[in-house]
Image: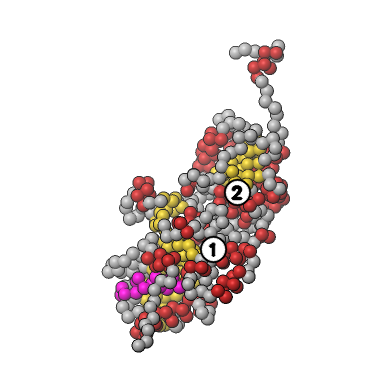
Amino acid sequence: MQEQEVIAPASIPQELFINSDADITIASGSAGSSKSYSILLRWFRYVDCPHSRGVIFRRTSTQLTAQGGLWEEAQALYRKVYGNRLKISIKHMKITFPSGASLQFSHYENEAAKEKFKGLQADYIAFDEMTEFTEEMVVYLRSRNRNASAETHHKACLVGATNPHCDSFLKDWVWWWLDPETGIPDPDKRGITRYFVKQRDGTLDWYNTREEAEKIYGKEEDSGITSMCVIGSTVYDNPYISKAYIGKLKEQSRVEQDRLLHGSWTAREESSGYFKREWLKKVNHPNVKAFQRVRSWDLAASEPSEKYRDPDWTVGTLFSKDKDKIYTIEHISRFRKKFLGVEAKILEVAYIDGTDTIITLPLDAGAGGNSYAKTLQAKLSEHGFTVKLIKPKANKVLRFGPFASMAEAGYVQYVSDDGLPVDEKWNNIYLSELEQFDGGRKGHDDCVDSTSDGYNYISKSISLPPINITSFTQSNPFSREF
């Protein structure tokens, strides 16, 4: 008697991925951990519902149709179960199952292509190699993620499978599930579901339980509360992978090994920028020996809109320096607000920092930038704060160079954000931006500019010794008592 083939999850991560009930489930891991195959297996949860509609996306059609690609794998897998009862349209890359449920494979090449998905309704949306897509592309398709019929009773979901990529927006989404030191998925957090609400400025407001989120946003269906689960895995979780394949991964460069063998989201080529986070020492508290502090702001006055979905940030870097010339990055304030909101937030931060902290504002090119900086200087000065206007160097690389050199020499440290609420954490966002900076126009450089201005000011400024005001006035014949 011929032994019957059993189709089932081959590992714990694969089983967790298939059974997750979160609105968004992401399989994050190394190459060879069978993440893409998990997407095909999860569709079995929907296949018996006549009204189920699923779509699996890759960035290009070539990636879908390549030999051994997902389209070829899907046909082979589903034929094992349904044989000739499947209806397969090669032209439309669509598989219709005996129940009437259908699964389509589509490419989504750029943000402009979203127009062709306006009429889409799908209860199962999946991204293969999710880091190849932009945040806007993923968020838009979430609006298409709903049951196509009132007779469909199972929950609509969006899933993704991906190798890690340090420059992807997805790194910020999955960060809680990673080891903060290595960027590798933390096995103790594997499969835990958390909840977020997307803010107007594009950030995610995170909560550990739905009840915590509902206290803020309510229990209505339009509260915006979204559940998300991340399942980390490595090639070693796949019992069917060959040792020869693992050996090929071990032949890769150090960075590619960290990324493809161990699943690290922070792995980056050493020559890709001017800064490495390992140059900085992580400390638990601000420097008690510091005698000087400066908060340097890089200003913006915009919020996300339909036209500008990812505008610049207003960033304030708090630097301190001690007599041994140890520089400490004590805090980063980063937000998106319009003019009045920017002024209010900077004033709020100034009161927290105290009047001993000098504030610097950039005199940007153009009359408008100069006028705004001078107006803000006057308003802050009225509240008793010392505000300096500085004219930054036009060349951002030269501007950033002195800080990067001092960091490489080991004289810069930063305060850990461990223990802070998730929405107040700044370490990873800040360090990632500094690492990504290469002098080009790609990505944001607001933290870079704020850091450059702060370091360049505090490193060159001279602090006067303290003066005993009481003894001075007693010996001064021109002093007056009021």
Q: Residue at x 39, y 70 (%)?
A: 42
Q: Which mark is residue 447?
A: 2
Tell me which segment is drawn in magenta.
37-50
Q: Is 434 situated above or below 129?
A: above
Of 386 and 114, nearer the camera is 386
Of 471 and 295, nearer the camera is 471
Of 380 and 237, nearer the camera is 237
User: Which residue sits furthest left?
Assistant: 151
Q: Residue at x 62, y 56 (%)?
A: 436
Q: Earlier in the sequence, mark 2 or mark 1?
A: 1
In the rendering, at what x and y percent does residue 1 appear? 35, 88
Q: Is 245 situated above or below 408?
A: below
Q: Which is more foreground, mark 2 or mark 1?
A: 1
Q: Quadrant of the C terminus?
A: top right
User: Which residue sits furthest bottom?
Assistant: 1
Q: Quadrant of residue 5?
A: bottom left
In the rendering, at what x and y percent does residue 395 appear? 70, 51
Q: Which mark is residue 263?
A: 1
SS at mark 1 in the image = loop
Callout 1 crowding tier (Cα within 10 Å): few <14, some 14–19, many ≥20: many
In the rendering, at what x and y percent does residue 394 appear? 70, 49
Q: State how the image is colored.
A: secondary structure
Callout 2 crowding tier (Cα within 10 Å): few <14, some 14–19, many ≥20: many
Position of 361 compared to 4: left or right?
right
Position of 294 compared to 173: left or right?
right
Q: Is 324 situated above or below 366?
A: above
SS at mark 2 in the image = helix
